[in-house]
Amino acid sequence: MGERRSKHLVLILAREFASNLATPTAIADDDGRLVFYNEAAEEVLGGRFADTGEMEMDEWTATFSPRTRNGDPLPPERRPARIALNERRASHEQFRITSRDGVDRDVAVTAFPLFAHEDECVGVVAIFWRE
Amino acid sequence: MQVKVWGCRGSLPTPGPQTVGFGGNTSCIEVSLDDGTTLVFDAGTGIVELGFELARRGAERVHLLLTHLHLDHLEGLRFFAPMWDPKVELDIWGPPSPVSGLRERIALAFSPPLFPIDVHDVPAQVRFLDVPREQWEVGGASIYGDLVMHPGPTLGFRIEADGVTIAYVPDHEPALLGMTGRTRDWISGAGVAEEADVLLHDAQYSAAEYEQRIGWGHSSVDDAVFFADAVGAQRLVLFHHEPRHDDEALARLEERACELCGDRYEQPMLAREGLVVPMPAPTR
């Protein structure tokens, strides 16, 4: 058996936690694959997770054209979830997105890594704050 | 492979005339491989009698795998005969903790005021080992341990050997994290139990009792049957019986499980002390 047969328990717990939050929340696994976002996030992002399904986090993020308030593209290395995943630290950033419903929204995103053990990061949680 | 149940009671040993049918000893099963390897899962009070049996057989190499360290899975260890035999090499595998090592945590049970003898005075050659994150080999078995839903770090085990696969998940509350409408990979414990030939699974409560004990870390019979169905396990063995359930109550729960199961897969059965679990013919 080479790869995991199911999601890590910490991700399953995180999903259950997010499912019960009114705060928009997305979860990615340790490969940077978006595995879930909750109903509150569906409102901000203008699309249902059931329609999106799992996908690469960077690909998913790019669909919202994240950019600074000045309109400059926000590079991956400044995106909080990418930082949390690559650098294993919490990160926060304010930026503008165009949601799938075509509406421009100013958001702030806080992302942090999920450690099952000190040396085992199993994914990241990204929380969206409406500005 | 042979799987024998030495203890299947949950939470608290329950000796007495009302429980002689299914037994009152807490969790312990023995898995004997065709190559002679003996694997012991959990050290509830059921392990005491197994220890005497291993001593009679002259076992000098024992592998003990602990799902977690709650007392009903550990309390028999201090009276496990191989621990007190200097000829015995005993490997104890347990869940890694983010806080302290396995030896350190088990040592608490071997220290005053709980016990008079310190763990480093145990005569057997004991090694304390963290269960690895990947599948690993013990004797002729491939074993995989994964965290499952239960308070504190708790593992379920998948054992593949001699052409059959068994899953041992004695303490587990997958319903707390949702099962209905979830794909298999999002169900706690699915990674160890998927398509197992035999699944020994927590079924401590009736559905009505579970409603009063949500979050305590255990399953109802109904949820155990649902879980077995969701992960595609062939034969379900209901385990970790509620201490307050006498033999009659357990027999009713077994009937309930069979009703729920219908003809979807082999009929569920309740674990009882001394049971040698009927194994399917090897297919792999």
Image (spheres, coloured by chain):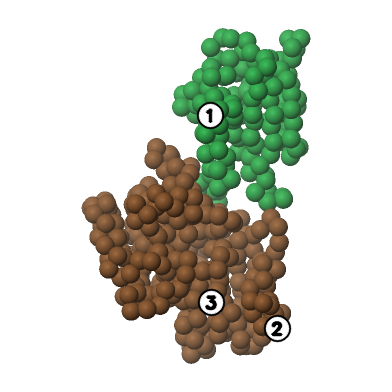
Chain colours: A green, B brown
State whether discs 3 and 2 lie on one chain.
Answer: yes
Dot 1 falls on which chain? A
Task: From the image, tell me which residue sits under label 2.
Answer: B121
Position of B161 with respect to B74 (left or right) is left
Q: Please name the amino acid that badge 3 sits on.
A: Gly
Q: Please name the amino acid that badge 2 sits on.
A: Asp
Packing grade of label 3 (10 A; few <14, some 14-19, many >=20) is many
Packing grade of label 1 (10 A; few <14, some 14-19, many >=20) is many
Dot 2 falls on which chain? B
* Up-down relation of residue B99 to residue B35 (above or below): above
- x%, y% of residue B168? 45, 62
For the point 46% across and 76% down, which residue is it? B46
On-image quarter of the C terminus of chain A: top right
Closer-to-camera residue (A42/B235): A42
- x%, y% of residue B92? 61, 71
Position of B246 with respect to B156 (left or right) is left
For the residue labelled by badge 1, is the local secondary structure a helix, a strand or a loop?
loop
Position of A98 with respect to B31 (left or right) is right
- x%, y% of residue A105? 64, 13
Q: CA distance from mark 3 to mark 2?
A: 17 Å
Task: From the image, tell me which residue sits under label 3.
Answer: B76
Packing grade of label 2 (10 A; few <14, some 14-19, many >=20) is few
State whether discs 2 and 1 lie on one chain.
Answer: no
State whether discs 3 and 1 lie on one chain.
Answer: no
Q: Does any portion of residue B269 appear in the rendered image?
A: yes
Q: Are marks 3 and 1 in contact (CB under 8 Å)?
A: no
Dot 3 falls on which chain? B
Task: From the image, tell me which residue sits under label 1.
Answer: A38
